[in-house]
Image: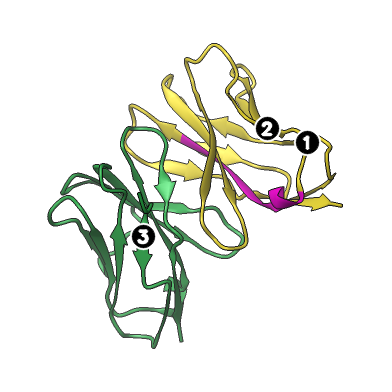
Amino acid sequence: AQKITQTQPGMFVQEKEAVTLDCTYDTSDPSYGLFWYKQPSSGEMIFLIYQGSYDQQNATEGRYSLNFQKARKSANLVISASQLGDSAMYFCAMRDYTGGFKTIFGAGTRLFVKA
Amino acid sequence: DTGVSQDPRHKITKRGQNVTFRCDPISEHNRLYWYRQTLGQGPEFLTYFQNEAQLEKSRLLSDRFSAERPKGSFSTLEIQRTEQGDSAMYLCASSPLENIQYFGAGTRLSVL
């Protein structure tokens, strides 16, 4: 069965420093996608970054990068040069491409950026 | 492009009443998803449409829940005989392809 685990309920980071948010996943499907979303207090889920299971290189989008370690089944999000506006909930999610259309989300990590 | 729109943003209802939520996806997106999110949790998948066809439903979607997308554009989610356990944020998302989903701001339901 598919599963996403985010073990850090909350994280603190100093402004301008980098932070890593952990995500591990479990699936038996060889074809899948991994996503990170940001949810500020306003409630809207904002797409950040995507990694396909067959992608050879780690995904990057601006200050966001995904540290994809397939053998360990981990997909950690790295935010560089943290900003105060990065304070939010962050969700890791996964979609199997042969097992249906369902996307599952982890429980999330709340990030606090300190000035 | 106005993004995914959900209406209403907030709904307060009494237990036993029926409620209906609407989602307008991004216009060129033929894939539409509904999720439920309770406090402190990630979104839980409810159902998926490709155009007007409902291709997958979660077991979370009890017989009190029904979703439609009659013309392959906007979608509605109806909850009949609401219960206090239905109180949650209901999120809609749309996508043009099989991967990235773009979410609306959600409808927050409170059942008294």
Chain letter corresponding to the colour yellow: A
Same chain? Circles 2 and 1: yes
Across and down, in percent, residue A39 comes to 58, 53
Marks 2 and 1, how far apart at CA:
7 Å
Q: Residue at x 62, y 40 (%)?
A: A5
At numbered mark 2, what does the secondary structure look like: helix, strand or loop? loop
Badge 1: residue crowd in 10 Å (few <14, some 14–19, many ≥20): some
Relative horizontal placement of residue B72, taking residue B59 as reference (left or right) = left
Image coordinates of residue A43 in percent, x first then y, are 54, 61
Name the residue rendered at 33%, 50% in the picture. Answer: B33
Residue A76's image quarter?
top right
Quick one: label 2, few (<14), some, or many (20+) residues within 10 Å? few
Q: Name the residue beneath numbered marker 3.
A: B5
Q: Secondary structure under badge 3?
A: strand
Q: Which residue is rendered at x = 43% and y = 19% of the image?
A: A30
Secondary structure mostly seen in the magenta stretch: strand
Q: Which residue is mark 2?
A: A63
User: Which hue is chain B drawn in?
Assistant: green
- The span shown in magenta is A84-94
Q: Which residue is mark 1?
A: A81
